[in-house]
Amino acid sequence: MEYGYGGQPNFGQVLFFGLGAVVGATLTANLLPMLAGLNVGDICTVSSQLARENVASTSPVISVSVWVVAMVIGSIAGGIMGLVASYPALRVKEEWFLSMILLVGGEAFRIVVMNTPQIGCGFNGLAGIYNPFTWFNNYIPQSWQTYASTGLFAAIIIAFAFGCFVFAQRIGNSPYGRLLKSVRDDKVASESLGKDVTRIRQQIMVLGSAMAGLAGVFYVYYIGVASSDDYITAVTFSVWVMMILGGYANNRGLLVGTFVIVLLDRGSLISGLLLQPYFPTLDPNYFVYGRYMVEAVILLLVLAFKQKGIFPETRVKTKAYTLFDFGKKNNTTAARTTDNPNQGGKNS
Amino acid sequence: MSNDVILRVEGLSKSFGGVKAVDNVSLSISRGSITGLIGLNGSGKSTLFNLIYGTEKSDNEARIEFDGHRIEKLSPHQRFKLGLGRTFQTPRLFSGMTVLENTMLASKGQRGEHPLTAAIPTRWESQELEFAKKARQQMKALEIEVLYGKLVTEISGGQMKLTQLSNATMGDPKMLLLDEPTAGVAPRLAQDIFQSISNERQSKNTTFFIIEHRLEVLFKHVDRVLAMHEGKIITEGTPAEVVKDQRLIDAYLGG
């Protein structure tokens, strides 16, 4: 949304994502035993991990509420970081300087986290962040336990993603969506029509960063570890590939792009494990890292044949169109078929 | 300060490299008037507009007074909110949006332009419909109604000019700076544009300050003409006075 609608190339997505992850994990690791009345000392130790597991699998109230708090604080932290970053970033002349600043910011963040044991346990990462629905397994027959809590968590993540999608759709088809596109297309002209361009750019950066922070919290809860290895700049570029693939300024396209990339990402991991017995001489890493090659090929194909992505940009659909579109639907479709009798419905 | 002066400018200057594009210009425009600004290419007309609108900053301490407010330190969007509007010489429209979206964007005080209210359509939809009605009337007047669903990259240069004009009037400005509103527009339509400018002035008492090269059309509708040459205003008066002015004739003939 930041780029597609607002026109701001944010190459520091990983900064806000990583921050959300570290803040979420640290908060969880401290709060979980505290609320359970335990004193575990250093949150990086294995014993503290076990204590967290114990709380996560026995106390529904504590684990879910800590998770909610982590989400709220994680996205607030992302948002605040976005606000801070927006001060230097929005005052540079060229869009691409902004992207460079954020790119460097993301990488700097990773290096700082990696080398500072006080932040998220440094190089080793903060392990033992358990699924907030681990306790759910206690109420499920033994044979289903592997899937129950993960399934529940996955369902909730999907619900959240759907909520975000609806939110993005609504914003995209509102006067605010129009406003963002105007800032993207021509800042001077937008300013001339009375739009406070600097403030709008700041807003969208804070909003985007908060969402990335939230995603970071979800990610650590899913993967179980907050590790600096996960905040490499490739994460940012993955997000970009998702967008280029799906189409700019089109939420549906973004959804499809994300789906494809995540499928590749996880799929390559799983296929690596599944196929290994058949190719014992082959390093499973070929599959895991082969995905970057597949991504690259897909990216090149899309750029070569479908520059606007799988779903091109759409109108900002508000009720304003109802005054104009009335009774014209048939005319336009008729015109289209007579214009292009050979191409049929293919013209886009 | 008399009440019927809407814009008063004192001492605007702007240099690009060694060239003085605008050289210590002072002027005043009375409320409800249509004033033309003429001059050769490169005489500083558009730069003067940019300075008045705040798109560019004056080199020296200048004083710009608009509708009783000192505006020289305000940003363009703040000047817009006080009732000053403008168009650009080469149309600057939003290329990813349709003609209707461009016009709708220009509406003033939209409730749905906040990220939080935007997600709740009931908060802004009735207002949106009102603006759409107004946009439709305006687009009808300028004969661009049928283009509503076209991307602005798909329409002709003249149509872009018209779209820009309809954008500029959408916010009901007290004063409009128009930079060559009829360049690239068919002659008949040029007449219509000036007619609609006259109508707008009559119905809403809007003040117009217009850069234009089509003198024959311009002179039919303006009250007063300013002529610029090499960054300075060399003469001003009614069209009949100005055409007789020797300085202007010299400037135009390169004397």
Image (cartoon, grey):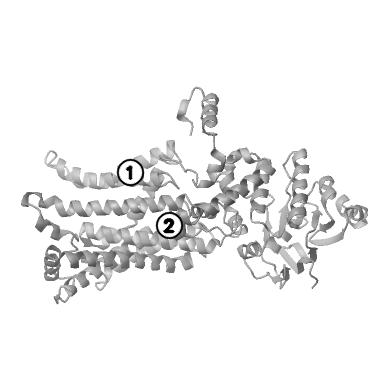
Q: Which residue shows up at 14% across the image and 39% down it?
A: A279
Query: Dot 1: within a 10 Å radius of its alpha carbon, few (fewer than 14), some, or many (20 or more) residues?
Result: some
Q: Label 1 vs label 2: CA separation?
A: 20 Å
- Ranked by sequence position, the earlier of labels 1 and 2 is 2
**Eyeballing the image, is B167 above or below A340?**
below
Instruction: Report if residue B169 is visible in the image.
Output: yes
Q: Which residue shows up at 73% across the image and 56% down it?
A: B204
Where residue B52 sits in the image (x, y, percent)?
71, 63
Q: Chain of mark 2?
A: A
Q: Which residue is mark 2?
A: A10
Q: Which residue is mark 1?
A: A295
Where residue B231 sits in the image (x, y, percent)?
78, 61
Where residue B93 sits in the image (x, y, percent)?
60, 49
Instruction: Report if residue B96 is visible in the image.
Output: no
In this view, the residue in front, B132 or A277, is B132
For residue A236, side relative to residue B108 (left or right):
left
In this view, the residue in front, A205 or B228, is A205
Q: Tell me the amino acid under the disc marked 1.
A: Glu
Q: Tell me the amino acid under the disc marked 2.
A: Asn
